[in-house]
Image (cartoon, rainbow, N blue to C red):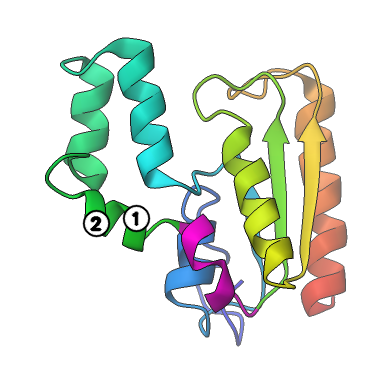
């Protein structure tokens, strides 16, 4: 959540980790739902899953860069590799059956944050995937986020 309660609220959950690591003074806390934390790792996953010349690889390359041409930049901007810069509590929520963004992205972020002594809570959402089709998962995300925000920034 932006400090001072800015007009836009929290960063989108897909960019919450980038916000917490690249602009650490801007937010009071961050909530990430199935977020990407390691850019080279997600690119490698997509390449193995769909192939070098797939639509999926074209998407990722157009959004974050080429694994061959931009590898240094991908590493340098990966939230899990920037955990030391985090100054806020982070809530990670991830569906266990997610194949779009594998749960190891949140596992890696949790490990990196803990290694740096940061405040992190990781909640696994069982029996659900990236689309969050289970009502129980969506409800749990809302309840856990409400608890986290109340504890992190008050009411």
> What number is the disc on residue 72?
2
Where is residue 63 shown, x and y percent of the image? Answer: 24, 43
**SS type, badge 2:** helix
Where is residue 8 shown, x and y percent of the image? Answer: 49, 68
- Residue shown at 57%/64% (left/top)? 10
Residue furthest to the left in view is 69
Along the line of sight, which residue is nearer the eye, 99 or 111? 111
- Residue shown at 79%/23% (left/top)? 135
Where is residue 123 shown, x and y percent of the image? Answer: 80, 42
> What number is the disc on residue 75?
1
Q: Are marks 1 and 2 in contact (CB under 8 Å)?
A: yes
**SS type, badge 1:** helix
Where is residue 120 shown, x and y percent of the image? Answer: 76, 62
- Residue shown at 52%/85% (left/top)? 25
User: Which secondary structure is most common in the magenta stretch?
Assistant: helix
Please provide the residue range marked out in magenta.
Answer: 79-87
Q: Residues within 10 Å of mark 1 (few under 14, many from 20)?
A: some
> What number is the disc on residue 61?
none
Residue 137 to residue 66: above or below: above
Image quarter where the C terminus lies is bottom right
């Amino acid at each position: 959540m932006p400090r001072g309660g800015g007009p836009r609220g929290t960063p989108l959950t897909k960019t919450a980790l980038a916000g917490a690591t690249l602009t650490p003074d801007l937010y009071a806390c961050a909530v990430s739902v199935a977020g990407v934390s390691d850019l080279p790792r997600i690119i490698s996953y997509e390449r193995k899953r769909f192939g070098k010349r797939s639509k999926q690889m074209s998407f990722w390359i157009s959004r974050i860069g080429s694994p061959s041409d931009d590898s240094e930049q991908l590493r340098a901007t990966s939230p899990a590799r920037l955990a030391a810069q985090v100054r806020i509590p982070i809530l990670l929520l991830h569906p266990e059956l997610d194949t779009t963004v594998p749960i190891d992205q949140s596992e890696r972020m949790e490990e990196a944050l803990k290694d740096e002594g940061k405040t992190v809570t990781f909640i696994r959402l069982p029996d659900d995937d990236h689309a969050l089709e289970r009502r129980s998962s969506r409800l749990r995300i809302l309840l856990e986020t409400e608890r986290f925000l109340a504890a992190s920034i008050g009411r």
